[in-house]
Structures are given as structure tokens and as C-alpha cells.
Amino acid sequence: MDRRTLLAATPVLAAAGTAAAQPAAPALVGRPMPKLEQPEPLPPDRRVGFAVVGLGKFALNQILPAMGECRKARLAAVVSGDPAKGARIAAQHGAPRHYTYENFDEVARDLAVQVVYVILPNVFHRPFTERALRAGKHVLCEKPLATTAADARAMIAAARSADRWLMTAYRAQYEGFNREAIRRARSGELGPLRLITSDHGRPVKPEDPADEWRIRQALSGGGSLHDVGVYAVNAMRYLSGEEPAEAFATIASDPADPRFREVEDRVAWQFRMPSGLLTQGSTSYSYRETKRLTVFGEKATLRMDPATDYDLRRMWLAPEGETETEILLPLRNQFAAMMDHMAESVLENRAPRTPGEEGLRDLLAIEAIHESARTGRWVRVPPV
């Protein structure tokens, strides 16, 4: 008996085979708002407008795409030395306006811009920060804050005079793994801290326009220590919650390597912290890319590798007498988190977590490292 004959001979089965006999579809109704992992984003017209100054590799590959993940910040303008490039990037990212370095001061009349994000070679951090402050804008400035501690002090003074916030763009301090490392290191979970080590370096490539300025002293203010080494200096401070009392360092560069005619390559240093904690770090423009840190406590060791990568962070904990285990955390966009924090500072009129003084403290430590390398002695790190 074929299926058609069977259905005709069996009323129940025949009814089941018709569309009319199918159960009615349930009604689709609205559900209550679910609990969100992050706060709801602000409406676009309530977000803080940012003007990004400098459209190099970092801005184009990291910062502008991250704007799409921001919840409190939005792109209001871009600034470039190339008008055609500025116009093209503004159109691509939906920025209402674009400026050049020459007409940048016109941003004073742009009410859509509340924050200027300075992403330029280090020597231009101070002049563009001061121009932005004179225009009445708050400033987020890339690290290092300046080429010298004296310039950083001048920038901080200018922000106070303008009654505007100045924030150093230390993205790692807004990133989940590093925030968790800070919590564990300072909570006592690891026991009294005994040693922190951090190594940050990468090969510098002069043929890459993004690296060309880094090996010119007049533009960068220094070599690997001012660039990737500042991550290690900053990590030693934020993990311990202490400021270095003294520094001892050695600097070495291959005189035959044309990359290091003006700036340093390898730097190794130690800090003595007021509590007795020791830290040791290294940085280089010639060893393979490295972004790692380790916190040694009496009860446990915390290790991160990579610690400050753009896209990947990993962390392990090794309590005394136990096997090292990996700590798993969600990876979120650290650039978006940093810009949203700056936006919160503007919206709530409160100081950012990494103000200009945070950048100044690292520059004071970096200058002590350089002096120690010159003199061969322990050098006191002056207070802010």
C-alpha cells in the first residue's frame, strides 16, 4: 500500500497530513529588557565628540575602528597634514568635519568637538595639546605624554589654566586582564610583593613610515624606552601601587646598526620601591616582539604573556605548591574602554584615572633611568 492509499484509508493519519490540522503557531510577544553585560550606549547626540589628530597606522587600524564600539564617545572630526587624506578618512568613518594641522585652531568654533585625541610623533604632543586646550577642548594624549618631564609639567599646567582635563592614553589601565592583575597584586592574594619583572620590545623597521620617526631623536625624544619601554615602567607602578624611589640602568646599542645612530636600542633597569619591592625591566628595538610581565609574591606568582597586546592577553596564576592555571577573562576592546572613560570624565566632570600626572611620573622615572645609565650609579626618582 502506497502512502496516498494509506492516508485515505486512515482518517487520523489523513487529518494529520493536512495543514489545517497543524497546531496554531504561538503568538510572538515582547520580552522584558534582558540584563546587559555592559551599560546601554548613549544616544549619538549625547555622546562626547572626539577629534582625532594624526591619521597614521595606529589611528587608522586601532582608534577609528574602536570608535564603533564606544558607548559614550563618538568621532566628530579628524585632523591630518594631508587635506585629501583627511577628507577621505572623514567620509569613510562618518566624521562631520576634517581639519589640517595648519587650520586646527578653528576647532575652537566646533561645538561638536569636546575632546582632542593627540596621536602624533612625541615631539608634537605638547604643542598640539596646548593648542587644543587654548581652543577650550579636553585632551587625550598618546604615551609618552611628552619627550621630557619639563614639557609634561607645562602641559599639566596648561590644562589646569584652561580648566580642562588632560588624560594620558594608557590603554592597558582600561583593559580587563591588566585591571584584574592590579586587583590581585594589590589585594594581598599573592602575599607581600617581592619582585615585578616586565619586558617590552619589538624590532623597529625604518622602512615603515610608522617607524621612521621613532629612530629620530628630534621627533621621538628617545628610543625603545620612550616607546615600548614605557609600558613596562607604567606596569611596575600600577601593579605595585608605588612610585619608584631609585633607578639603576644600563643602555646598549650596536654602533654599526644605522637604526641606533640617534636613539637607544636595549635598556635594562631596576627600581627600588619604598616598601622594599624590587622591579626589573627591559626594552629593545632589536629583540623579537615581547609584551610580558610577572608579579612574584610570597604566596603566589602572577604571569601575563602577552600583557599589553592590541588583540590578545593571557594570564596565569601559580599559588605556592600548586600547578599554574590560566585565568580566563573576556577580551574587550581596550581602546573603546579608554575613550569611553575619557568621555565619562567630561560628562561627569571628574578627573580621569590616568591624568597628565600619570604620564609625568613615567617620564621622571625614564629620565632617572637615562641618568643612571650615563653615570653608572643609582639615581633618585624625583616626586611629581
Image (cartoon, rainbow, N blue to C red):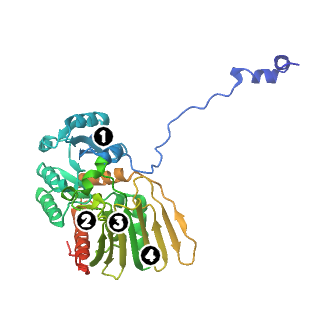
Give percent across and percent down for residue 37: 45, 51
Q: Nearer the viewer, mark 3 or mark 2?
A: 3
Q: Residue furthest right?
A: 1
- Dot 1 or dot 4: first in sequence order is 1
Residue 185, image quadrant: bottom left
Q: CA distance from mark 3 to mark 1?
A: 41 Å
- Dot 4 or dot 2: first in sequence order is 4
| Relative height, residue 115 to residue 313 (above, below) | above
Q: Nearer the viewer, mark 3 or mark 4?
A: 3
Q: Which residue is mark 3?
A: 283
Residue 343, numbered label: none
- Dot 3 or dot 2: first in sequence order is 3
Q: Is residue 308 left or right of residue 111?
A: right
Q: Which amino acid, mark 4?
A: Phe
Question: Is the residue marked by circle 1 packed among few (<14), some (14-19), or many (20+) residues within 10 Å?
Answer: few
Q: Quadrant of the N terminus?
A: top right
Q: CA distance from mark 1 to mark 2?
A: 30 Å
Give yes or no for contact between labels 4 and 2 (Cβ–Cβ under 8 Å). Answer: no
Question: Is the residue marked by circle 4 packed among few (<14), some (14-19), or many (20+) residues within 10 Å?
Answer: many
| Residue drawn at x 29%, y 49% as measured from the top left | 210
Q: Which amino acid, mark 2?
A: Glu
Q: Nearer the viewer, mark 1 or mark 2?
A: 2
Q: Secondary structure at mark 1?
A: helix
Q: CA distance from mark 4 to mark 2?
A: 24 Å
Q: Secondary structure at mark 3?
A: strand
Residue 354, image quadrant: bottom left
Viewer-proximal residue among 62 and 160: 62
